[in-house]
Amino acid sequence: MKTSTAQLRRRLLSSVVPVAVLTASLLAAGCAVKPEPLTAEENLARVRKDLSVVLAPQEPLTKAVSMDEAMARAIKYNLDERVKVMEMAVATDQLELSRYDMLPRVVAAAGYVGRNNDAGSESLNLATGRRTGESTTATDRNRRTGDLAFTWNVLDFGVSYLRARQSANLVLIADERRRRVVQGIMQDVRTAYWRAVAAERLLKRLEPVEKRVEGARRDARTLEALRVQAPLQALNYTRTLVETLRQLQSLRRELVAAKSQLGALMGLPPGEPFEIELPPASVMKTPPKLDVGVEALETYALLNRPELLEESYNERISADETWRSLLKLLPGIDVNAALRYDSNSFLLNQRWADYGARISWNLINLVSAPATKSYAEAQEELVAFRRQALSMAVLSQVHVAVLQFRELKQEFALTAEQADLDTRIRSQYTNVGEAGQVGELGVIQSEVMALLSDLRRDLVLADLHNAYARVMVSAGVDPLPETMAADDLPSLTQAVGKGLSSWQERANSVLRVKDLMAKDAAKAEKPEPAKAEPVKPEPAKAAPMAAAPADASTPFVLAFSENPAMEPSAAAVFAAVPALEVK
């Protein structure tokens, strides 16, 4: 008996010691955690990985880049746009995961149970209060278990369904944010392109003028040293030349970075050379045309601005959140079933199935129900007010963008006229200078003034195109169609050009749709005249027939099919438009 007891003790110690050692090791490891900065090798690996993505090869630049191609390259290779695309992909994957939450839980488990002695027990006679004195067991020392359990909570299903609907709306929100980024990129590309065009046109003319000013400056210093002129006259002459040279250098500094900014927007590696396709001279003298009224732009913006659509999806999410809060107040119903196995030899049935149902309800939820409902409704009202405030801000942005475009258009007309006058004045100075009737300083100053006037005209044209792009962004215009056959660079370039040339027609179609809806509404409200029954031979006359319901025509539905984004709240928006018109 002593020997068996010692053996049991050794077995117990042999099973307890490893567990104690493992526990002590885990505790020691947890206490030993400390901040560890990145090593030089890890940092270098990060840089290499990031540069491999940032400097990934693109389609080669085989010709001069037009504005449409610059926008297409920005859409395809710009990192900000790619970030939004990845965010949309993440939101889509999150939606796929949330769909699995609606399924019941099916858990498969297997295990092994063992002990160092028998699980024996005695019985107590309740009548006599005496123990039976016999130790019995109904469990093997070592046994194997397994089960396949099915559990489904009806309340969790409803909550998971609403959560999946929220995830679906989050996917749409991610898409609207991507649209907003693309629209901003298009505005930046348009501005950078026209500034780069101005730089390409004028930087080539700067160098000879700078050389001529430098030569005149050296001659002036020589004349000052020889005292050919009066000292004050020579100094004023030199000062004028230095001021002219300073203006030219300031002009160069303003233009030299325009091309690099355009390359960065297109996703080109820093410093990579490329050529810009210069527009014809007639285009440089022709401002962009805006043939869309303010009312059409405002209506189009209310229907298509990504921010407003995002808030509409947020309103859906808030409504679903309200339902989720109310569902959590209801009792939960659990339905479960399982197939089980136990290798215990004392069991009569080692394999069996069990099932059941259970209902539970937290009665405290009855007390908190009014507060929960009030909070959820307040959230919905907040989202609605935020969308309404944003709608007013959108209307103001459209109105301001149109005003700025019109003002810049007038300014461009004046700067173009001034540039033409300075060019003619330069020609006159050049002619009289060659005849010796005027000094070189006057000729140089006329050339510099003509150059500065050309620059102002081109920069105002760039600002005018920026204002034109701001009108598009404020109206929520997409440069690309919703679906494309391919995403290669030529297809993107063609789609961008088509979208930029047709957006005004799409915006004007909003008013046509509005007129059709107004006529249809008026037709529905105005009843048709009642038609009397034909006179019969009998003396009694039949009562007149009731007016037939107006025939609801559907041309506006067909028009909306071209732009699905306009469908959800078109009627509500058009009903509110007359009160929001800006004259």
Image: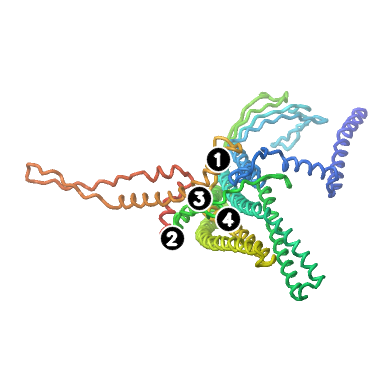
* Residue depicted at x 45% and y 42%: 562
Q: Earlier in the sequence, mark 3 or mark 4?
A: 3
Q: Which mark is residue 528?
A: none
**Which amino acid lies under the numbered mark 2 shown in the image of this protein?**
Glu
**Which amino acid lies under the numbered mark 4 shown in the image of this protein?**
Asn
Marks 3, 1: nearer the viewer: 1
Is 28 rendered above or below residue 16? below
Residue beneath label 3, please? 304
Label 4 and label 2: CA atoms lie apart by: 25 Å
**Which amino acid lies under the numbered mark 1 shown in the image of this protein?**
Gln
Q: Which mark is residue 581?
A: 2
Label 1 and label 4: CA atoms lie apart by: 21 Å
Label 3 and label 1: CA atoms lie apart by: 23 Å
For label 2, the SS is loop
**Which amino acid lies under the numbered mark 3 shown in the image of this protein?**
Asn
Q: Which mark is residue 466?
A: 4
Q: Earlier in the sequence, mark 3 or mark 1?
A: 3
Q: Earlier in the sequence, mark 1 or mark 4?
A: 4
Q: Residues within 10 Å of mark 2 (few under 14, many from 20)?
A: some
Q: Residues within 10 Å of mark 1 (few under 14, many from 20)?
A: some
- Left or right side of 481 for 37: right
